[in-house]
Amino acid sequence: MKRLWTDGRIFTMNAEGHEANAVLVENGKVIQTGAKEHLVPLADEIISLHGAAMYPGFVDSHIHLIGHGEKLSYLDLSPFTSIKTIVEKVAARVNKDEWYVAEGWNDNKFEEHRPITSQDLDVIEDTPVVLKRICRHVLVANTKAIEIAGITRDTPNPVGGIIGKDEYGNLNGLFYDEAQQLITSSIPVVTTDYLKKVIEASVTDLQSKGLTGVHSEDMAYYGPYTVPLEAYRATIKKNFRVHLLRHHEVFEQMQKEEGSEYVEFGAMKIFIDGSLGGYTALLSDDYSDSPGTRGVAVHTIEKLETLVKVARKYNENIAVHVIGDKAVELILCLIEQYPAPVGKKDRLIHVNVLREDLIERMAKLPVVLDIQPLFVPSDFPWVIDRLGNKRLKWAYAWKSLLDKGFDCSGGSDSPIELADPLLGMAAATRNEYLPEQEISDFEAISLFTTGSAKAIGKEHIRGKIMAGYDADFTIVDQVLSKNTFGTAKVMQTIVNGEVVYQRKK
């Protein structure tokens, strides 16, 4: 059946200001765009937009889809501004002998001006409790959880991680980056049935936000990769598009797996460093508010080289978590030595802190920069103290990077930030802390349309409303701009030419 969408503002994203009067769709593909009067005779069904605005389907290029789904059901710690309140809320929810896990605490907002420790949580004696920091690069565990994990003050730090201790050398319950696995490996593994429900809830919520797809990385955190993969295959049909990055620990195992049009497999995911909030992002110079601290390298340079070589062995690109400038420097050296396969681009995720010399090197390489606009309102103003004013020139430098010609995609990093692309666009165009880095309306929308398509090499079939492209659309009640990103409402979300979300009247 040929369906014609018309009677609204249809923004193709082929170029700034470019609009179509009508869009003809058949079998999940855009057949033709053009004038309504020319396309009506070809249509079996005419669908009126009633004056609404249509865009290519929004895609979040960096999200943890399962984590987002879990956040919908468990206690979200991000709104709380005191340790006392968090402990009270958690204590009211725990069940004796059952592990309790939640996330989202942010010590930069606490009135106590410090992180949560096991001493705070030890009012809960019989239940193992694990609370992940908002950045997911630090967690705090109570003594019960630490005992179950078999960790003592003599347990050595793992490579790429730090076990937190107080001034007397006693455990304080904090575990940084790779050290988190010492605790999380003891948490009972979830089932495929549980993950099916979580994924279903997550997708339903994301569709209501206008998202037609996401790029996620969930293959190494829920037992064998086959557990979450089976849940994805059972849940994702023709209603959503999921591009799964493959964690380096399961990358080779997954080579035998075949993707589909709706569950795709992508680059090898590698973590180089941690977060600025947890002082684990890897910097070339000391943190301004913590002299002597430069962050944590998750892997040795030898291990990183091995991982890159494995990816290239399978003719694959890499997607690399890099927040600090030193982390970027480390991976650029390896990309220069082992270039991306012809026709593919490596993905640098976050790139919060850069240097001019790194920009020049990046410009010579086939890379896509995966940025998160919502990090700005989340990280400022405290990050100014972390970095100092001198480093801010190339920090969160979205406008400068776009002006340099870099391909950039937009993500939320949910559950760390809110998975709402309209809020991401608003943050990208309104930056009270770095006004010189505000980007245009068109550039902001591009991050979540053409940009996300470029990040996975699908720019020839996704991200625009053009003949031959996937019929994935996001329909909002008004034309999007700096002044409307925060107030616009998603009316419909269309995937493969079918309505998967309809706003209730």
Image (cartoon, helix red, strand yellow):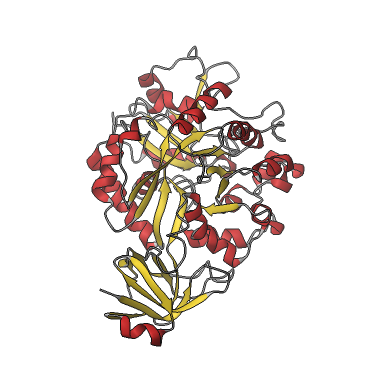
Q: Residue 124 at what x, y percent from top left?
A: 38, 30
Whether residue 484 is visible here, answered yes or no, is yes
289 left or right of 196? Answer: right
Which residue is at the front of the view, 426 or 443?
443
The quarter of the rendered structure image containing the N terminus is bottom left
> In this orientation, does residue 49 appear?
no
Where, quadrant-wise, is the C terminus in this rendering? bottom left
Q: Is residue 454 above or below residue 6?
A: above
The mark total stands at 0
Residue 356 image point, x, y percent:
73, 43
Residue 338 is situated, as x and y percent measured from the top left of the image, at 56, 32
Q: Position of residue 280 (x, y in %)?
A: 59, 32
Q: Is residue 394 left or right of residue 139?
A: right
Identity of the residue furthest to the bottom in this view = 37
Viewer-nearest residue: 286 or 470: 470
* Residue farthest to the right, as pictured: 390
User: With respect to residue 97, does 389 lie above or below?
Assistant: below
Which residue is found at the position 45% from the left and 44% from the top?
A: 77
What is the quadrant of residue 126 in the picture?
Answer: top left
Residue 378 to residue 113: above or below: below
- Name the residue nearer the viewer: 45 or 322: 45
